[in-house]
Amino acid sequence: MDRLLDITELAAILGLAPKTIRCRSPERLPEAVVLPGERRRRWRESDVRAWLAGLPAPGQAEIRTAAPQRTNRPGPKRRGQ
């Protein structure tokens, strides 16, 4: 069975303060688990390790798709022109 990490353990692995993790947007962190009858979130250790492995290495540029190039086509004609 996979070990569940609390916020303090997750913070130690990420090198952050627990307060920083509480303030982060949940979509920027690995998926959390909430046990029945609990309010606190937990993280599967394997999910955290996989999430870290998928992050770009320091100094590596993040690859993004280029936005479509705008053309210099004239727009719709305005009234009175």
Image: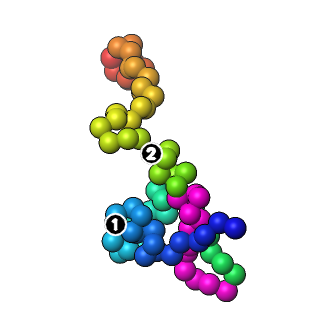
Q: Residues within 10 Å of mark 2 (few under 14, many from 20)?
A: few
Rendering quarter of residue 65:
top left
Please, which residue is most extreme toward the bottom here? 37
In the image, which disc is placed on residue 64?
A: none
Residue in the foreground of this view, choosing between 68 and 60: 60
Q: Quadrant of the N terminus?
A: bottom right
SS for tag 1? loop
- Residue 37 is situated, as x and y percent measured from the top left of the image, at 67, 86
C-alpha separation, residue under disc 2 versus residue under disc 1: 16 Å
Q: Check disc 2 and give the amino acid type.
A: Leu
Q: Check disc 1 and give the amino acid type.
A: Leu
Q: Quadrant of the C terminus?
A: top left
* Image marks 2 and 1: residues in contact by CB distance under 8 Å: no
In the image, which disc is placed on residue 16?
A: 1
Does the magenta segment cover residue 14? Answer: no
Extent of the magenta region: 37-48
Residue in the foreground of this view, choosing between 74 and 1: 1
Q: Kindly identify which residue carries mark 2.
A: 55
Does the magenta segment cover residue 46? Answer: yes
- Residue 55 is situated, as x and y percent measured from the top left of the image, at 45, 45
Residue at image position (42%, 31%) is 63
Residue at image position (35%, 75%) is 19
Q: Is residue 56 above or below residue 29?
A: above
28 relative to 18 in the view: left or right: right
- Residue 41 is situated, as x and y percent measured from the top left of the image, at 55, 75
Residue at image position (38%, 20%) is 70
- Asked if one can make out residue 27 in the rendered structure from this viewpoint, the answer is no
Q: Is residue 28 above or below residue 67?
A: below
- Residue 79 is situated, as x and y percent measured from the top left of the image, at 38, 23
User: Which mark is first along the chain, 1 or 2?
Assistant: 1
Residue at image position (47%, 51%) is 52
Rendering quarter of residue 77:
top left
